[in-house]
Amino acid sequence: MDIRKVAVIGCGMVGSSTAFALMESGLFTDILLIDKNRDRAVGEAMDLSHCLPFTRPAEIRAGDYCDLTDYGTIIVTAGVAQKPGETRLDCIHNNVNVFRSIIPQIVEYNTDAFLLVVTNPVDIMTYVTYKLSGLPQNKVFGSGTVLDSARLKFSVGRRLNVDPRSVHAFVIGEHGDSELAVWSSANVSGIPLDEYCAHCGYKSHKENRKKLADEVKNSAYEIIAKKGATYYGIAAATTRICESIVRDEHSIMPISTLVNGHYGLNDIYISVPALIGSGGVEDIMDIKLSDEENAALVSSATTLKAALRDIGF
């Protein structure tokens, strides 16, 4: 397995944007694109290759599943995109059928790679990938609420007129309507968020929190309504996860991972803070939640389990 080689399966807007972000990162020496429409993959590879005089050396090419043998990370973005008016969970049945075709072809040629699932509903599709692939849990994970957490940091930073990189807060649970912002531990460079808000003249903490959380939760719907799809943000989030793996950073991010015994949950893929390094998911962090937050996380898991039962998993 070569950790500097990455494959992207699915060359739609998310897949192609992810490939572009990966190329720009300089993390990989080889980027393989696979799509059911071979011409689409070839065209994307050609277009991306023409960027190489401006970036770092890499081999970017279209290929087939048989070419996956030594790739260290395989990113799955293939599936039916969320349409205006749909929730992420509305995509389930079509995308499960897509994965029943894709995942067996991946593991036929490679059982050593990390499988990073981006296709929505990502928590469900990552669980499906885990079951269909038979790979260990540390090697199968989803992009989860990494992007949602970035959206929260952006929204808080914009409201408080502070660099969003100085905002530390997680969104956890389902990447979807039942997600929750962990306000109890949110801070701005170590200053509890409520204190920093008060310093900026904001007093109605509960109302402001709800407004910000709703803004984050609904942002994807707004983007989809306005331009048809979201792809730049998830491309950046996916690249950030890959960065932590390739560089063995041991960064903590709220990815979708198999939870057993943490937060009172079992046998569910859901987004919680996890340690990411060269071993994939190396640990799950049990951050302290308020009683209200813990109940919301359990409720989110219940929503996901109901969806899994509906598709027979």
Image (cartoon, rainbow, N blue to C red):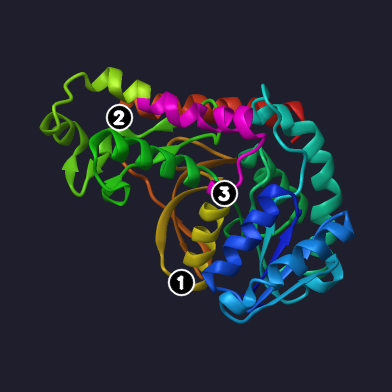
Spatial CA distance of label 3 from label 2 is 33 Å
Q: Earlier in the sequence, mark 3 or mark 2?
A: 3
Residue sitting farthest toward the left: 199
x 28%, y 33%: residue: 159
Q: Which residues are magenta?
A: 212-233
Q: Earlier in the sequence, mark 3 or mark 1?
A: 3
Spatial CA distance of label 3 from label 1 is 24 Å
x 61%, y 55%: residue: 137
x 79%, y 54%: residue: 103
Residue 248 is labelled as: 1
Residue 60 x, y percent position in the rendering: 72, 73
Is residue 215 inside the magenta stretch?
yes
- The local secondary structure at tag 2 comes to loop
Quarter that holds the N terminus: bottom right
Q: Closer to the camera, 270 or 234?
A: 234
Q: Amino acid at mark 1?
A: Asp
Q: Amino acid at mark 3?
A: Tyr
